[in-house]
Image (tube, rainbow, N blue to C red):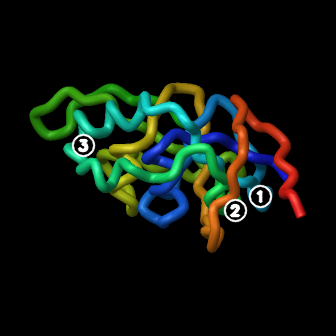
Amino acid sequence: MKALTVLQPMASFLVNGEKHLETRSYYLNPGEQFAVHSGKSDRAIKYFQARCKLSLDTLSSPRGYILGIATVEKVWKISIKKGLYGNCLLSSPILTDINSKATIDIIKDGWHYPWDLRTCEFIDGWYAMEVSVKALETPIPAKGQQKIWEWEPKE
């Protein structure tokens, strides 16, 4: 099965349904599944502790485990639009569905999952995979890798 390593706390946010987008420079097609692996690095934990004022409790999520199985529901191409929004000059991510070509301006139109705005990197030319995730009852220890990798559950 394909797998993606996602740093904590984002891996837990994905599995718990608080985060719905996973942004990457590449994507998996709608309908494809992948195992959500929680990376061991604490780089993102320190960043989110400072940026989002998250408690240590929230940030003590398991690292180095397969936490759930995700299904790609939709893939969005990210572009960045700079412009005035009210009295502010902002950069707004524009998401374009790779199949229907429908677009959403996240700031102007709003995004139905606000936590994604705090936990995703919206980089021009990247992709946002909108996913649904089924959490595993018991996380499975696994050694992750970068990019898409193959994971074989041990019987």
Q: Where in the figure is residue 17, as x and y percent of width and height?
A: 48, 66
Q: Nearer the viewer, residue 155 or 74?
A: 155
Q: Could you give the CA–CA distance between mark 1 and mark 2, rounded to whole angstroms? A: 7 Å
Residue drawn at x 61%, y 68% as measured from the top left = 135
Left or right: residue 55 versus residue 103 is left
Residue 64 drawn above or below residue 87: below
Report which quarter residue 25 is drawn in. top right
Q: Residue furthest left?
A: 87
Looking at the rendered structure, which numbered label has been put on residue 69?
2
Q: Which mark is residue 33?
A: 1
The answer to whether residue 60 is visible is: yes
Q: Amino acid at mark 2?
A: Ile
Numbered label tally: 3
> Mark 3: which secondary structure?
helix
SS at mark 2 in the image: strand
Give the left or right position of residue 24, taking residue 11 as reference: right
- Residue 58 horizontal/vertical position (percent): 33, 54
